[in-house]
Image: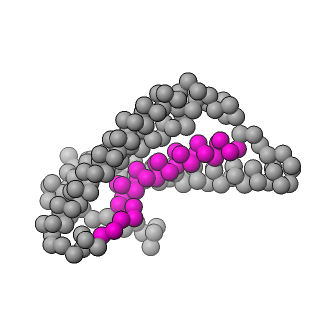
Amino acid sequence: MTQALARLTRASADFLVKAAAVGLVLMTLIVGWQVFGRYVLNSSPFWSEQAALTLMIWYVSLAAAAGVREGFHIRIVALENAVGPRAKRVLRTASDLVVAGCGLAMAIWGAQLVARTWEHTIPSLGIPRGLAYAGLPIAGALIALYALERLLEEAEGETVEDEEDPRWS
C-alpha cells in the first residue's frame, strides 16, 4: 500500500509545484501590468492587487504542501545529526507528528475561514472571498497526508530522507 500511496503523493506533489510555479508567473505578470499601468498609462488596473494577493495565497499554500512531501523545507538538523539512529528516528517521527497536526489544524480552521467568508465578495474581482482562502484547507489536508506518508514509511522501517530534487542542485 505504501508504494501506491507514494506514487500518488509524488504525482500530486509534482502537480502542486507546477501549479505553484504557474501561479507565481501569473502573479508576476499581473504586478508587472499594474506597475506599467500606474507609471506609463497613469491608470492602474483596479483588479490587479487583489488578483495578485489571491494567487499568492494559493501558490504559497500549494508549494508549502509539496515541500512537506518532498522534504525541501528549511529545518535545523544539527540535533538530528548529533544523535544515533534510534534517537534520529524518534526525532523524525515527532517532527512528522507535529507537521501532521499543523496540517490538520490548517485544514479544519482553513475550512471554517472559507465557510465564514464565502458570502463576502471581493469587489474588484467579483468572486467570493472564501474562494481566495480555499487553498488553505486543501493544502492543510495535503500536508497532513504527506506527513502521514512519512510516518508510515518510518513505521515500516524505511529510511525517510529528504528528497534531493535535481532542480535545486
Measured from the top left, where is residue 53 in percent x and y?
A: 61, 45
Q: To which quarter of the image does residue 77 belong?
A: bottom left
Tell me: 99 left or right of 165: left
Q: Is residue 39 above or below residue 46?
A: below
The answer to which of 5 and 112 lies nearer the viewer is 112
Please, which colouring scheme is shown?
Answer: one colour
Q: Is residue 120 above or below residue 60?
A: above
User: Is 75 colored magenta in this rendering?
Assistant: yes
Q: To which quarter of the image does residue 120 belong?
A: top right
Q: Residue at x 64, y 46 (%)?
A: 52
Q: Residue at x 46, y 67 (%)?
A: 167
Q: Which span of residues is magenta-colored?
A: 48-77
Q: Is residue 118 above or below residue 24?
A: above
User: Is 134 colored magenta in this rendering?
Assistant: no
Measured from the top left, where is residue 51 in percent x and y?
A: 64, 42
Q: Is residue 7 visible?
A: no
The answer to which of 11 and 52 lies nearer the viewer is 52
Tell me: 91 left or right of 46: left
Q: Residue at x 40, y 36 (%)?
A: 109
Query: Which residue is most to the bottom?
Result: 82
Measured from the top left, where is residue 119 in percent x and y?
A: 56, 24
Q: Tell how many labels.
A: 0
Q: To which quarter of the image does residue 48 belong?
A: top right
Q: Is residue 156 visible?
A: yes
Q: Residue at x 22, y 56 (%)?
A: 94
Query: Which residue is most to the top?
Result: 119
Tell me: 29 left or right of 137: right
**Main SS of residues in magenta:** helix
Tell me: 28 left or right of 153: right
Measured from the top left, where is residue 88 in percent x and y?
A: 19, 66
